[in-house]
Amino acid sequence: MIRTGPAAPVILAFVAAALWGLWWVPVRWLQTQGLDGAQGGLVLTAGGMLGGLVLVLLRPDCLRLPRRAWIGAALVGVAFTTYSAALNYTDVVRAILLFYLAPVWSKIIERVFLGLPWHWTSTVALIAALGGAMLLLGGGGGFDAGFRSGDIIAILSGMSWSAAAALIFVSGRTDVRGLTAVSLGFTCLMSLMFVLVDPAPVPWAQMIPAIGPALAVGAAYAIPVLFLTMWSAQRLAPATLSFLLTAELLTGVTSGAIWLDEPFGWVQAVGAALILVAALTEVFFRGGTGQART
């Protein structure tokens, strides 16, 4: 049972973000097995979908969700899939940072569609986040390296996530198992669509040895992380949650720099620090848990 103290959504969102930051590891491992583009993501998300099917079989009524919650969970699946695909089509650092323009889209949604106030701290947080993104993308492997298809996919992924977070937030407290199962189902469906439009041939014979481990990782990894993310999304305003999930940078960018030798110098370090400052500003000065539903 997850405790519902005022700090719980913030802490668990950080935990989920740290785990999301390592999602690129199995995606890239499957790429070494010959599964390029969205093919590896399809196998991983298929494992998650099978786990989600188990959740539904154990509790069929968990799918009785409001329409907005259904759409929100489906958009999480879209964001999850496009993010996984972006990791294969651009640098890990670029994919993560462009996805985390999500706080910008979330603030716009909050102000325009949810009627939430825009505080001066929100402006500071957005400037810090955008400045940090520009620094991280501008050093070595920045926009001077050319804008790639994976960059566009990563931006669309962040937009999908922002819309999803808003819809889940306004839907109130619904069954998190249902949200997780719906999201996993749409993730697998979207992954299949990416594979079908990808011109790369699927190396069926070569991928067989990797299928079992990939399915297991997909189920064991995606279900708990999505569950924590959905639980927090019900209790934190969209922008607050989006800023909190920038904690993924701590594991994603750092691990990408260490294991993939991607560019990460003092310029990128300052950029990462600015993005984390943006998250802390949004949470502590705006009163992040104060935005939570009760």
Image: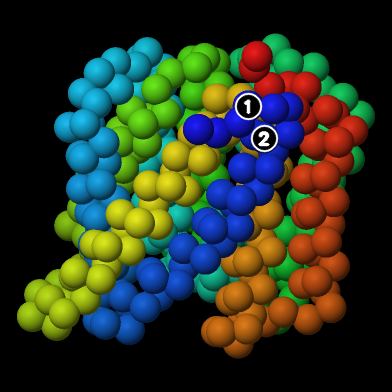
Q: Amino acid at mark 1?
A: Thr
Which residue is most to the left?
A: 205
Could you tell whether 35 is left or right of 143 in the image? left
| Residue at image mark 2 | 8
- Along the viewing direction, whichever of 197 and 158 lies nearer the viewer: 158
Which residue is at a point 18% across and 70% down the rendered structure image? 211
Where does residue 283 sit, x and y in percent of width and height? 80, 36
Which residue is at a point 86% across and 41% down the rendered structure image? 281
| Residue at image mark 1 | 4
Could you tell whether 242 is left or right of 152 in the image? right
Where does residue 191 sit, x and y in percent of width and height? 27, 53
Which residue is most to the bottom?
A: 261
Relative vertical location of residue 112 with respect to residue 239 in this rendering, above or below: above
Asked if disc 1 and disc 2 are in contact, CB closer than 8 Å, the reply is yes
Q: Amino acid at mark 2?
A: Ala
Q: Quadrant of residue 233?
A: top right
Distance of label 1 from label 2 (alpha carbons): 6 Å
Which residue is at a point 31% across and 42% down the rendered structure image? 184
Relative vertical location of residue 35 with respect to residue 221 in this rendering, above or below: below
Residue 218 visible to the viewer: yes
